[in-house]
Image (cartoon, helix red, strand yellow):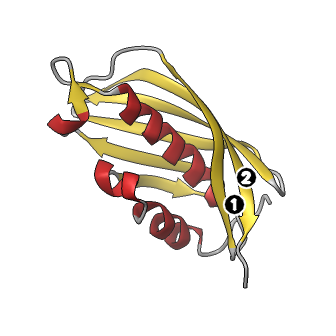
Amino acid sequence: MTAANPDYAEHVTAAVLTMPAAKHLGFTFGRLEPGVAEIVQPYRAELTEHNGYFQGGVLGSLADFAGGSAAGTLLPPGWVNMTVDYTVKIVAPARGERIIARGRVVRAGHSTTVAAADVFAVAGDDEALCATALVTLRNVKLPG
């Protein structure tokens, strides 16, 4: 599974943005290309804690969505992926106008795909790495 579905952008955004967690977070897609996904989360007070720092759970969710979305761009029509495991390492506090999560496929396979994500806090023109993640996904053919 290394060639992109020609309709990957439509399928990935439709699948991801209808998920309850994605609706709650309210992020948008930035860059979306075969094997790559960028998610942009604007500052929202309800997603922050401790004087405006983004919550760790928000960073983990964005990393998971970015990695899964990058992997989803490589699935053929009629297939979906499901996260089976992800590990997030918080490396710095995340405070800024927005968060950008950049996911990329590390290893694409028929039944399993591994993706990585880097999460940055953005303030003006400055980006600071605040988390990294490794996401393992199972690729599943939908019935029908």
Q: Report crowding for label 2: few under 14, some 14 to 19, many 20 or more residues within 10 A (C-alpha).
A: some
Of residues 47 and 124, the one nearer the viewer is: 47
Q: Residue 90: where, in percent of width, then height?
A: 46, 19
Q: Nearer the viewer, mark 2 or mark 1?
A: 2
Callout 1 amino acid: Leu
| Residue 23 placement, left or right of 16 | left
Tell me the residue at 64%/54% (across/down). Answer: 82
Tell me the residue at 45%/31% (across/down). Answer: 119
List the residue tagged with mark 2.
138
Q: Which mark is residue 74?
A: 1
Q: Residue 75: where, in percent of width, then height?
A: 70, 64
Secondary structure category for the residue under label 2: strand
Q: Is residue 106 above or below residue 129?
A: below
Callout 2 amino acid: Arg
Is residue 49 at least partly visible in the picture? yes
Q: Quadrant of the C terminus?
A: bottom right
